[in-house]
Image: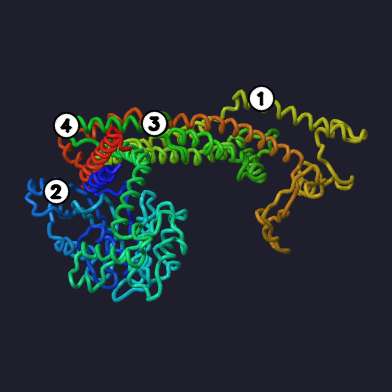
């Protein structure tokens, strides 16, 4: 199982080459407050001084430290092959193949690289530094050193430095594949440990938290850390390990880490003899190595699944970017043909990518025809904007100077044309809505169906322009046809239409039935012939002289005084009354402000209104059926049939090939990045497969 950690290191190297942070590999994250001894713990594990020292915040970028154990013989062999002087060396990811054998140079490079990104002030950065140490004196580990938790900004630090550091810490310890190494100084209260507090927020069960108590030698005289190390103060599932750090004086005097380890052992044997074998830097290294191996073993199944899923995703992404263009002529024709096919498929409902959030393409066109357009026509009132006075005026104007015995047919034709004309506006709006949807289909095909077009923005823009132009040319033709459909209905009012004739027959029967009912209600003393001829007479016998058919004043008076049930009320303007003693102008003769319709006038108006409604419904039915057909023929189907040839004719030209197939500036870069990531994932899959073959898992 010891070989599992080098495998994870190998995976880390694979993903470092592509700068990817998409896989959370098992690692140990070191967390603690400033000056808690985090850096000293790490240096003790390495056995060398490699980290910057000082007061305040020193670690200002995450340091991902990989310790690689190599045998002494392998170390000598590798050193000789690569011209390395020494058995220990280090490498940074950002310096590529440069090898550092002087660990003071490694420390200086950490400082320089930190200042290069984070600046010379005390600001922090999330971009990590990757360092790999090869040595026969280390155990295989992967550790992450993070900035120490602070409370108040110092100097020119940003005011939210505490929040920035905590966000950075949570980014790493929230990884379920990480082990949290919570570092706390022994001369502080364990119950107030910030490191344990943040660890418990992401690991409440403590399954992946190990506590380290530093500075055991700096506790107050007469006190010890026995209760803390035994877990009596705060129990930690994975354990609590105490260590002794080098003091600042030791560091200033260049005390070796190896010497400090011997002094640590002596201190533990003297101060904590019963716990000496379960504390100290060497025990900490072995414990971390064991925990990391078991953690890696538990994480590998999920890690393998994650890598396979990402490999499939990046393969799909790489396919969408397409291969570099070799035959531009063939590529252009293929893209044009594919776009035209996808456009037509979207209209027909057979597209590969079907929208699930809203209606699109042919389905939306169908909705426009049968829901939007259909309901709009049904909402048009056959007698809308038509008053009784309009009907009566039309009847009178159609008779001229002669009183009419029958309702003039010309009045019906005049009024019904006025109503039918109202169907033109919603019909043209239907054309506009379908045109807008045909325009939206272009964007739909670009976004979902033909992602290859995103590689060539100029080709995409050219295709959009050609299709838009084709739609724009068909719009007036379709509008003209729809206008003609309404004009055809206005050109000839077919009163012999079968549906209209049936409606007239039913209406005449209803009128006759109403007349018979009125006849039955009359008193027996009234002669039937008089009732039939003048059934509208009213008033007493004294009113008869003014009731003659030739006396217009009597007709108006009769209209005023008649029963309300037989006549409707008409409203007229009230001109100024002629003054007494002046000549009378007939045009200024006072007309009553209102009067009631005579029975005949009321009947004539009702007849015309019923005829208008009956004929309007017939025309509306025709328009509701013919307009969608016209739109489909002149707009939708024509665009479908001509799109391919239009695109080829406008774009498939030798002089346009180079310009149209110019890739976007970042497309080649994204293709290379996706290809590199895919190679890394495939290599990671092979590494995990090797684990299974060697029975390490």
Instruction: Give the spatial CA distance, label 3 vs label 2.
Output: 62 Å
**Viewed as shown, does residue 609 lie left or right of 179?**
right
**Viewed as shown, does residue 690 lie left or right of 576?**
left
User: Residue 355, position in %: x, y?
Assistant: 43, 37
Helix, strand or loop at mark 2: helix
Instruction: Give the spatial CA distance, label 2 vs label 1.
Output: 108 Å
Occupied quadrant, residue 28? bottom left
Q: Mark 1 points at which residue?
A: 502
Q: Which of marks 2 and 1 is in front?
A: 2
Lower position in the chain sequence, tag 2 or tag 1: 2
Lower position in the chain sequence, tag 4 or tag 2: 2
**Viewed as shown, does residue 85 lie left or right of 590?**
left
Q: Name the residue under label 4.
A: 327
Helix, strand or loop at mark 3: loop
Number of the label disc, if any, that sits on residue 75: 2
Occupied quadrant, residue 467? top left
Lower position in the chain sequence, tag 4 or tag 3: 4
Q: In this orientation, does residue 370 appear?
A: yes
């Amino acid at each position: 199982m010891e070989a599992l950690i080098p495998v994870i290191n190998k995976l880390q190297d694979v993903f470092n080459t592509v700068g990817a942070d998409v896989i959370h590999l098992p690692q140990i994250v070191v967390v603690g407050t400033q000056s808690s001894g985090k850096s000293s713990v790490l240096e003790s594990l390495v056995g060398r001084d490699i980290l910057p020292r000082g007061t305040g915040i020193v670690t200002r970028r995450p340091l991902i430290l990989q310790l690689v154990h190599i045998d002494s013989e392998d170390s000598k062999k590798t050193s000789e092959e690569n011209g390395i002087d020494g058995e220990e060396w280090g490498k940074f990811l950002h310096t590529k193949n440069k090898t550092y054998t002087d660990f003071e140079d490694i420390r200086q490079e950490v400082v320089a690289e930190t200042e290069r990104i984070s600046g010379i002030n005390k600001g922090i950065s999330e971009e990590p530094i990757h360092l790999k140490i090869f040595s026969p004196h280390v155990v295989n580990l992967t550790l992450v050193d993070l900035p120490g938790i602070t409370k108040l900004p110092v100097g020119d630090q940003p005011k939210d430095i505490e929040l920035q550091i905590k966000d950075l810490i949570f980014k790493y310890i929230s990884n379920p594949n990480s082990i949290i190494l919570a570092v706390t100084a022994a001369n502080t209260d364990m119950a107030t440990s910030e490191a344990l507090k943040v660890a418990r927020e992401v690991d409440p069960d403590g399954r992946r938290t190990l506590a380290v108590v530093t500075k055991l030698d700096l506790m107050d005289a007469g006190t010890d850390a026995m209760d803390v190390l035994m877990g009596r103060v705060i129990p930690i599932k994975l354990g609590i390990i105490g260590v002794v750090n080098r003091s600042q004086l030791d560091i200033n005097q260049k005390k070796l880490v190896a010497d400090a380890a011997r002094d640590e052992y002596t201190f533990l044997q003297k101060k904590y003899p019963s716990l000496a074998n379960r504390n100290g830097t060497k025990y900490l290294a072995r414990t971390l190595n064991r925990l990391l191996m078991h953690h890696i073993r538990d994480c590998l199944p999920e890690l393998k699944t994650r890598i396979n899923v990402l490999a499939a995703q990046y393969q799909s992404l790489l396919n969408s970017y397409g291969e570099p263009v070799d035959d531009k002529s063939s590529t252009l024709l293929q893209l044009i043909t594919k776009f035209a096919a996808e456009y037509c498929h979207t209209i027909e409902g057979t597209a590969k990518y079907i929208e699930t959030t809203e209606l699109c393409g042919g389905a939306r066109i169908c909705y426009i025809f049968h829901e939007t357009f259909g309901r709009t026509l049904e909402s048009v009132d056959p007698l809308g904007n038509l008053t009784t006075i309009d009907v009566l005026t039309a009847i009178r104007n159609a008779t001229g100077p002669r009183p009419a015995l029958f309702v003039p047919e010309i009045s019906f034709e005049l009024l019904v044309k006025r109503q039918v004309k109202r169907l033109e506006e919603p019909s043209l709006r239907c054309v506009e809505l379908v045109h807008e949807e045909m325009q939206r289909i272009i964007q739909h095909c670009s976004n979902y169906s033909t992602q290859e077009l995103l590689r060539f923005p100029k080709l995409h823009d050219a295709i959009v322009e050609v299709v838009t132009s084709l739609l724009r040319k068909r719009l007036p033709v379709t509008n003209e046809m729809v206008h003609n459909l309404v004009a055809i209905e206005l050109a000839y009012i077919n009163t012999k239409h079968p549906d209209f004739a049936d409606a007239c027959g039913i209406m005449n029967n209803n009128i006759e039935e109403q007349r018979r009912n009125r006849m039955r209600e009359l008193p027996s003393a009234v002669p039937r012939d008089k009732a039939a001829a003048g059934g509208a007479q009213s008033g007493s016998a004294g009113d008869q002289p003014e009731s003659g058919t030739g006396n217009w004043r009597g007709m108006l008076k009769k209209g005023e005084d008649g029963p309300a049930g037989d006549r409707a009320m008409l409203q007229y303007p009230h001109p100024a009354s002629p003054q007494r003693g002046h000549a009378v102008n007939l045009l200024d003769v006072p007309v009553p402000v209102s009067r009631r319709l005579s029975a005949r006038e009321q009947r004539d108006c009702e007849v015309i209104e019923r005829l208008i409604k009956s004929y309007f419904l017939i025309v509306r039915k025709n328009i509701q059926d013919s307009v969608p057909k016209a739109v489909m023929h002149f707009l939708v189907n024509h665009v479908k049939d001509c799109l391919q040839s239009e695109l080829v004719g406008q774009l498939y030209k030798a002089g346009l090939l180079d310009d149209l197939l110019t890739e976007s500036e970042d497309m080649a870069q994204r293709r290379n990045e996706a290809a590199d990531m895919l190679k890394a994932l495939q290599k990671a899959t092979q590494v995990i497969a090797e684990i299974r073959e060697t029975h390490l898992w």
